[in-house]
Image (cartoon, helix red, strand yellow):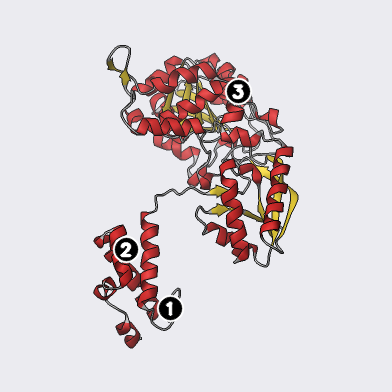
Amino acid sequence: MTESLARLPSVDKLLAHPEAETLVASFGHALTVDALRVVLDDARASIRAGSIVPFKGIVPEADALMASASARLREWVTPRPRPIINATGVIIHTNLGRAPLSDEARAAMSAASSGYSDLEYDLSGGERGHRMAAVEDILCRITGAESALVVNNNAGAVLLALIAHCAGREVIISRGQLVEIGGGFRIPEVLAQSGAKLVEVGTTNRTHRRDYEAALNEHTAAILRAHSSNFRVVGFTAEVSLAELVEVGLARGVPVMDDLGSGALLDTSAYGLAHEPMPQESLAGGAALVCFSGDKLLGGPQAGVVIGQKKYVEPLKRHPLARALRADKLCLAALSATLTHYLKREAELKVPVWRMISMPLEEIARRAKSWARTLRVRQAGIKAEVVAGRSTVGGGSLPGETLPTWLVAIACDSPDALAARLRRNDPPIIARIEEGRLVLDPRTVQAGEVKLLLDAVTAAVGE
């Protein structure tokens, strides 16, 4: 081992390698030295462990070390997150960045970031304006709200609402709605951070109106309804409707806060899915505040939207926490452009999430057949066929709900190895494995990505 370690070249010797000049020119001297030190440390660790993977030979040659350093440098300077091609059929894929933005939303972000903007400037009056002006008016027009506010995400929206209106007082919630959202965060923990006291009523599967009525007292600040957007309880169940909760609250002057989570501005039942509660329905039903996400079924950037009655929304805008949670100009630009699609009644055509949800099955079949045919022509012997399957909405929306689709199924010796090769592609391609085959779902692949996808699959199958 000692002899092998001694045979490793020094950093200075590697810097004299012909490849080093190219690396220094591309990445700079300091970063190149850092990469060389890292790969040498890796080589030493491999030798000590009795393994020389990924190097060949007992001691890695200088060429292998330089190649590893080059790969490390490219990895370091590649912007993250990286674009990928989603062929999984999961429309709102949390691990893959949730909702892709419309062309107009991306253009709005580019325009807002390329120079100065009227983020907090009133052009008509020539004085300081309010950053919510970009989205508040359009949110109110679409939903019928009296006032609106946008923060960084929905958990932040709920937290702000609870702190502003319920700190030091009681909030009533059904035990069946004590949900855990992404990343392990739980509604009870959010409530605890707000300083409000959680009052649980009912049971996990059944909560009745009388449970809420019995819990109301002079210390009650609000009734909170948390929509189960990422799970479903079936069987012997009972829950209280929003209309009933509002009646219970009004009798004692207690507002109802509605945490919808996903934020569907279109009726999901029109597309063969279960009905997802809509923000405009909650407001019409009497909810004082409604909170939902911007990057799920709304199809925009990550954001937390609060809409509702003016007397409940305005205090949130003035609260000190609002500044800590506020949305930046890129978020507001993208959200404004996305909301405009709804205002113009073109969301189904323009917002990628809704374009995928509403994609006709015949169109998906046409794409799948074309892909399979192309792959068979390009790669002799490839086993690619079109099979029926299901797409998933995903992203903590419409749990258990799927849409019929057509898949391109590729049979090979190792679907896992093929999937790994596709993930190493540039751009990476994420597929799924079903019944021992790698499958590609055309529903979630954008039109401009098809050639890249087929080229990558052709190359990966041929390896």
Q: Position of 160 compared to 214: left or right?
A: left
- Image quadrant in which you'd find residue 10: bottom left
Q: Position of 66 compared to 407: left or right?
A: left
Which element type, helix, strand or loop, lies under badge 3?
helix
- Residue 443 pos. (x, y %): 65, 42
Q: Residue at x 67, y 56 (%)?
A: 375
Estimate the spatial distance between the alpha carbons at disc 2 and disc 3, rounded to whole Å. Answer: 63 Å
Q: Residue furthest bottom?
A: 3
Question: If you read the primary sequence from the N terminus, does the residue marked by circle 1 or circle 2 appear first?
Answer: 2
Estimate the spatial distance between the alpha carbons at disc 1 and disc 3, rounded to whole Å. Answer: 63 Å
Label 3 packing within 10 angstroms: few (<14), some (14-19), many (20+): some
- Residue 346 pos. (x, y %): 59, 24
- Residue 413 pos. (x, y %): 68, 67
Estimate the spatial distance between the alpha carbons at disc 1 and disc 2, rounded to whole Å. Answer: 24 Å
Above or below for 63 versus 404? below
Kind of residue sitting beneath label 3: Leu
Kind of residue sitting beneath label 2: Leu
Which element type, helix, strand or loop, lies under badge 2?
helix
Q: Residue at x 37, y 79 (%)?
A: 61
Circle 2 sits on which residue?
Answer: 23
Kind of residue sitting beneath label 1: Ile
- Residue 248 pos. (x, y %): 57, 19
- Front tag of 1 and 3: 1
Is residue 197 in sight in this rendering?
Answer: no
Residue closer to the observer: 199 or 98: 98
Above or below for 259 versus 425? above
Q: Position of 438 compared to 13: left or right?
A: right
Circle 1 sits on which residue?
Answer: 52
Question: If you read the primary sequence from the N terminus, does the residue marked by circle 2 or circle 3 appear first?
Answer: 2
Circle 3 sits on which residue?
Answer: 242
